[in-house]
Image (cartoon, helix red, strand yellow):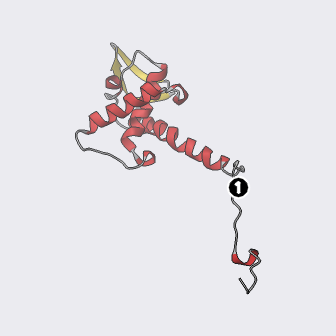
Amino acid sequence: KIILKKPVLINGQNITELTYDTEEIDGILYTQAENHKIKSAGQGGNLAGAIEIDYSLHLYIGYAAIIAVNPAYTFEDLERIKGSSLRDIARIGRSFFIESAKLQAENSDEQSGTTLELITPASMNWSESE
C-alpha cells in the first residue's frame, strides 16, 4: 500500500492510499504502460537503452501494478499524482525489473543442463612428434 502525500481526485473521490500488486500485471497492462510512457515522453524522448535504467518506464509499471488491483483507475488518473509519491510508485516499477534480475542471478549458482569442459594445452597430451 502507498500512502499519498497529496490526495488525488479519481472518479470523484479524493484518494489518499493506493494498493498495488506487481504479480497481477499482465501482458496487456505491461504494453499499455510502455505505450503511456512513450506518449508522455513525446516524440524521441527518453528512450533508455536498458529496462533497468528506464526510469519513466519504472513509473508506468508502478502505475500498472496499481491499476492491476484497482481496475476502475486509469493511467491518466494516476498521472495526476504529485510530489514524492511519484518516487514511491517508481520504486515499485523498478523493483519489478531489478528484483527479478537479482533472483535470476542468485539462481544462476545452480548447475545448468549444459556444462562446458575447458581444454588447456597442458591437458591435451600432445607428443612432440605431432
| Residue drawn where x is 24% and y is 44% of the image | 44
Q: How many marks?
A: 1
Which residue corresponds to mark 1? Answer: 115
| Residue drawn where x is 46% and y is 37% of the image | 93
Front in this rendered view, residue 22 or 16? 22
Q: Residue furthest bottom?
A: 128
Above or below: residue 79 compared with residue 105: above
| Residue drawn where x is 39% and y is 45% of the image | 54
Q: Position of residue 92 (x, y in %)?
A: 48, 36
Q: Quadrant of the C terminus?
A: bottom right
Q: Which corner quadrant of the image does residue 56 belong to?
A: top left
Q: Position of residue 83 (x, y in %)?
A: 35, 36
Q: Residue furthest left?
A: 43
Front in this rendered view, residue 99 or 38? 38
Crowd around label 1: few <14 · some 14–19 · many ≥20 (10 Å): few
Query: Label 1's element?
Result: loop
| Residue drawn where x is 45% and y is 18% of the image | 70
Q: Position of residue 21 (x, y in %)?
A: 53, 27
Residue 82 in view here? no
Q: Which corner quadrant of the image does residue 87 belong to?
A: top left
Above or below: residue 91 compared with residue 130: above
Q: Position of residue 62 (x, y in %)?
A: 44, 33
Amino acid tagged 1: Thr
Residue 79 in view here? yes
In screen coordinates, is 28 left or right of 43? right
Q: Residue furthest front?
A: 129
